[in-house]
Amino acid sequence: MTPDQVARVIQAFHPVWENTDSKIVAFADAHAGHGNFRNWAKVTAHTVRAMKRLDREQVDQDVLGLVFSKMSGRTE
């Protein structure tokens, strides 16, 4: 997907992205989604778990930091 498509599609794909700032979505795409829906499914699954773990109601840089660390295989 192009960046414009990501901005539209991902926010409709899952409720976790519905009210997420478009800059956060673009950041997640640049670092993990890469315009690929399969990647976004993984990002979303990790994001949902990270939000529960961090007790967050909104996706932010801290949530994405945890997501990216899980996706890269790094341990905390």
Image (cartoon, rainbow, N blue to C red):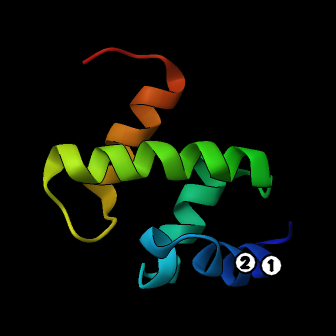
Amino acid type for the residue under numbered disc 1:
Gln
Which one is nearer the viewer's eye here, 64 or 15?
Answer: 15
* Tag 1 near tag 2, CB within 8 Å: yes
Which one is nearer the viewer's eye here, 55 or 25?
Answer: 55
> Label 1's element?
helix
- Looking at the image, which residue is at 55% across and 70% down? 14
> Label 2's element?
helix
- The residue that mark 2 highlights is 9
Q: Is residue 27 above or below residue 64?
A: below
Residue 42 image position (x, y, % from top left): 60, 42
- Residue 54 is left or right of residue 43, and the answer is left
Q: Is residue 56 above or below residue 50?
A: below
- Determine the image quadrant of residue 70: top left
Residue 64 image position (x, y, % from top left): 38, 50
- The residue that mark 1 highlights is 5
Amino acid type for the residue under numbered disc 2:
Val
- Looking at the image, which residue is at 18% across and 62% down? 56
Q: Residue furthest right?
A: 1
- Nearer the camera: disc 1 or disc 2: 2
- Determine the image quadrant of residue 61: bottom left
Looking at the rendering, in which quadrant would you find the N terminus? bottom right
Q: Number of labelled discs?
A: 2
- Residue 55 is left or right of residue 15, and the answer is left
**Crowding at mark 2 (Cα within 10 Å: few <14, some 14-19, many 20+):** some
Looking at the rendering, in which quadrant would you find the C terminus? top left
Q: Is residue 73 above or below residue 48?
A: above
Q: Is residue 27 above or below residue 32?
A: below
